[in-house]
Image: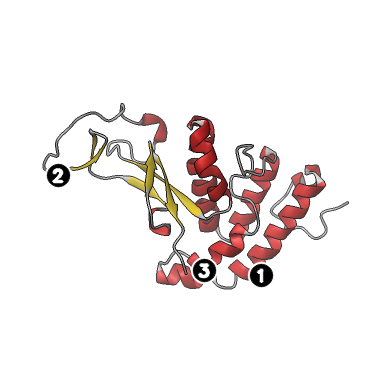
């Protein structure tokens, strides 16, 4: 076994440490990205559009939530997940960012913090990419600094210069927010920072 057919981005040959199943999946990801994403992705950049047309093909790779062992998730190694991320980013960093948000921040929040009922409800369709996850922060003073979030929301009223999001009698004041993958999706369900939305129909 060698790295003769691998790109030069894997300088230390970590691919050789993968199990056969994970290496085969990595090769499928590599082939898909080179054949179906690389030739068209610059056009989406130019138009500033999310590549909805590419989602079904990406879903077929079975890599959403790759390292999680929750319902419907592949349950593979952290190395397999990292090598897959490298392969996605090698062709287009924004596709990898999308997967990092969907499969990492959104699915990861449910995997680590969700109840069993929430895991059963959300993880299988998110692993199939029938639902696409986003991640939003409402703390205007923290930007994308997730660790520096404010305390849980409490009852509040809107004030000048801020908008107020209300749910179940509580409110979060927000002005400038950090939001990832928000435009990639259509229907919203909020779960304390992570959001899952239904993938738009063709």
Relative image position of residue 108 (x, y in whole percent): 52, 38
Residue behind mark 1: 35
- Residues at discs 3 and 2 in contact (Cβ within 8 Å): no
Q: Which mark is residue 170?
A: none
- In the image, what residue occupies the spot 48% across and 37% down? 118
Residue behind mark 2: 161
N-terminal label among 2 and 1? 1
Against 17, residue 199 (above or below) is below
- Name which quarter of the figure residue 46 lies in: bottom left
Q: Secondary structure at mark 3?
A: helix
- In the image, what residue occupies the spot 64% across and 63% down? 33
- In the image, what residue occupies the spot 54% across and 46% down? 103
Distance of mark 3 from mark 1, alpha carbons?
Answer: 14 Å
Relative image position of residue 123 (x, y in whole percent): 54, 43
- In the image, what residue occupies the spot 41% across and 30% down? 147
N-terminal label among 3 and 1? 1
- Mark 1 Cα within 10 Å, few/some/many (few <14, many 20+)? few
Report whether 46 appears left or right of 72.
left
Residue behind mark 3: 53
Can residue 107 be seen by looking at this rendering?
no
- Mark 2 Cα within 10 Å, few/some/many (few <14, many 20+)? few
Q: Nearer the viewer, residue 24 or 112?
A: 112
Relative image position of residue 39 (x, y in whole percent): 59, 73
Against 32, residue 142 (above or below) is above
- Residues at discs 2 and 1 in contact (Cβ within 8 Å): no
Distance of mark 3 from mark 2, alpha carbons?
Answer: 37 Å
Distance of mark 2 from mark 1, alpha carbons?
Answer: 47 Å
Relative image position of residue 68 (x, y in whole percent): 62, 38
N-terminal label among 3 and 2? 3
């Amino acid at each position: 076994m060698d790295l003769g057919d691998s790109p030069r981005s894997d300088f230390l040959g970590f691919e050789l440490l993968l199990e056969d199943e994970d290496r085969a999946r990595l090769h499928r990801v590599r082939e898909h990205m080179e054949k179906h994403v690389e030739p068209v992705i610059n056009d989406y950049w130019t138009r500033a559009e999310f590549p909805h047309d590419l989602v079904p093909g990406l879903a077929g790779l079975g890599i959403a939530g790759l390292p999680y062992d929750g319902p419907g998730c592949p349950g593979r190694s952290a190395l397999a997940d990292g090598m897959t991320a490298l392969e996605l980013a090698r062709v287009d960093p924004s596709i990898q960012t999308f997967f990092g948000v969907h499969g990492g921040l959104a699915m990861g929040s449910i995997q680590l913090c969700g109840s069993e009922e929430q895991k059963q409800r959300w993880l299988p369709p998110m692993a199939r990419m029938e639902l696409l996850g986003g991640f939003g922060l409402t703390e205007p003073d923290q930007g994308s600094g997730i660790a520096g979030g404010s305390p849980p929301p409490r009852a509040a009223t809107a004030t000048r210069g801020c908008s107020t999001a209300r749910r179940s009698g509580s409110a979060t004041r927000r002005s400038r927010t950090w939001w990832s993958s928000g435009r990639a999706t259509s229907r919203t369900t909020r779960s304390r920072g992570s959001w899952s939305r239904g993938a738009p129909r063709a």
